[in-house]
Amino acid sequence: MSYDNNNVFAKILRGELPCIRVYEDEQTLAFMDIMPQSEGHTLVVPKEAAATLLDISPAMLAATIQVTQRVAKAVKQVTGAPGLLIAQFNGAEAGQTVPHLHFHIIPRRGGESLRHHASETADMAQLQALAEKIKAALI
């Protein structure tokens, strides 16, 4: 999978498309998945143009996974989910749909089925309210 500068995450990083931000620093951006598989589904992307885990610089990968951990702790606290699925796909054959490296933070609760990926758009006001709670919980 090659990097496409017009992918949706690149456009979000350039400010060409909106997102509901949870966290941002010089190297990464975390935002709510607008088609969540579970309440609290959050994405973390590096600001480096890299299609997959195999393409990113080690320093940027380290920064991205550290932010993923930090945001995951806040998501878990806010949602009260007993478990978290941290997912990352490399290549279309592995299920990657956007050619920009990203990590999914998906809260998991016993007996709850995940929604199908990219199947249903969430209520934006509810996502914004949840994002504010996650921001407040970041430690």
Image (cartoon, helix red, strand yellow):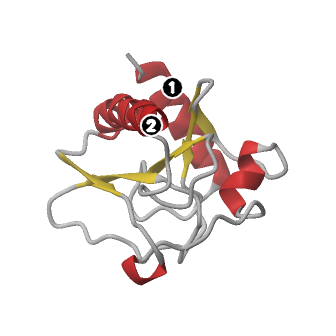
Q: Quadrant of residue 87?
A: bottom left
Q: Residues within 10 Å of mark 1 (few under 14, many from 20)?
A: some
Residue 72: assigned label = none
Q: Position of residue 44 (x, y in %)?
A: 49, 44
Q: Position of residue 36 (x, y in %)?
A: 48, 61
The front one of 121 and 126 is 121
Mark positioned earlier in the residue sequence (1 or 2): 2
Q: Please tell me in which quadrant of the rendered image residue 108 appears.
A: bottom left
Residue at 71 percent across and 53 percent down: it is 10
Is 9 on the left or on the right of 58, as rendered? right
Label 2 environment density (alpha carbons within 10 Å; few <14, some 14–19, many ≥20): many
* Nearer the observer, 75 or 43: 43
Does 114 sit above or below residue 77? below
Residue projecting furthest to the right: 16
25 relative position to 107: left or right: right
Residue linked to disc 2: 64
Quadrant where the C terminus sits is: top left
Q: Which residue is mark 1?
A: 135
Residue at point 42%, 55% (across, down): 53
Q: Position of residue 104 (x, y in %)?
A: 41, 54
Q: CA distance from mark 1 to mark 2?
A: 17 Å
